[in-house]
Image (spheres, rainbow, N blue to C red):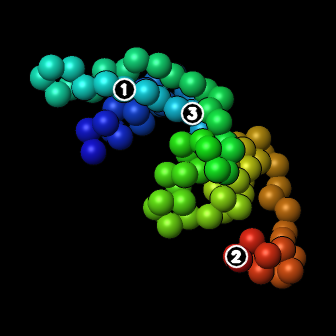
Amino acid sequence: ELVGAESLKVFRILELKDIARVDLRLDISGAPKVIDINPLPGISEAYSDLPILYRMSGGTFPSLVRGILRESFQRQGLKWPKTTTKARHRDAA
């Protein structure tokens, strides 16, 4: 929980957008210390941390990508396109 809070704090302080990877290590007292920040982390469905962790938490790769895109559209003031019923069923599979 402390590591997640520290990552989010760094993300906000640096005004990162959409996704980023914040690498931390715990010091001898157990306090998280930032060792690296990657504003363009991998998003390969099979090999990258974010999609793998998202899937482990119950999400799907299409919903992850859709969420990233939706946030980006919103931030840019763009309208999110309506999805067809066929696309919704395909993404749910």
- Which kind of residue does numbered mark 3 sit on? Ala
Which quadrant does the C terminus fall into?
A: bottom right
Q: Which residue is disc 1 drawn over?
A: 24
Is 23 or 52 nearer to us in this picture? 52
Residue 9 seen by the camera:
no
Give whichever of discs 2 and 3 has the lower sequence position: 3
- Which kind of residue does numbered mark 1 sit on? Leu
**Marks 1 and 3, Cα distance to the nearest angstrom?**
13 Å
The residue sitting at the left extreme is: 29
Give whichever of discs 1 and 2 has the lower sequence position: 1
Q: Which residue is disc 3 drawn over?
A: 20
Position of 1 with respect to 58 (left or right) is left
Q: Residue 61: which numbered mark, if any?
A: none
Task: Find residue 89 and report its horizontal and vertical position in percent.
Answer: 77, 80
Position of 85 with respect to 43 (left or right) is right
- Where is residue 85, by image quadrant? bottom right
Task: Find residue 11 and report its horizontal and vertical position in percent.
Answer: 48, 30
- Where is residue 29, by image quadrant? top left
The residue sitting at the front extreme is: 47
Residue at coordinates 36% horizontally, 26% vertically from top-left?
A: 24
Residue 53 seen by the camera:
yes
**Marks 1 and 2, Cα distance to the nearest angstrom?**
34 Å
Residue density around tag 1, few if under 14, some if 14–19, many if 20 or more, within 10 Å: some
The vertical placement of 89 against 70, above or below, is below
Residue at coordinates 31% horizontally, 24% vertically from top-left?
A: 25
Position of 25 with respect to 42 (left or right) is left
**Marks 2 and 3, Cα distance to the nearest angstrom?**
26 Å
- Where is residue 16, by image quadrant? top right
Asked if disc 1 and disc 3 are in contact, CB closer than 8 Å, the reply is no
User: Callout 1: helix, strand or loop?
Assistant: strand
Q: Which residue is disc 2 drawn over?
A: 92
Residue at coordinates 53% horizontally, 55% vertically from top-left?
A: 54
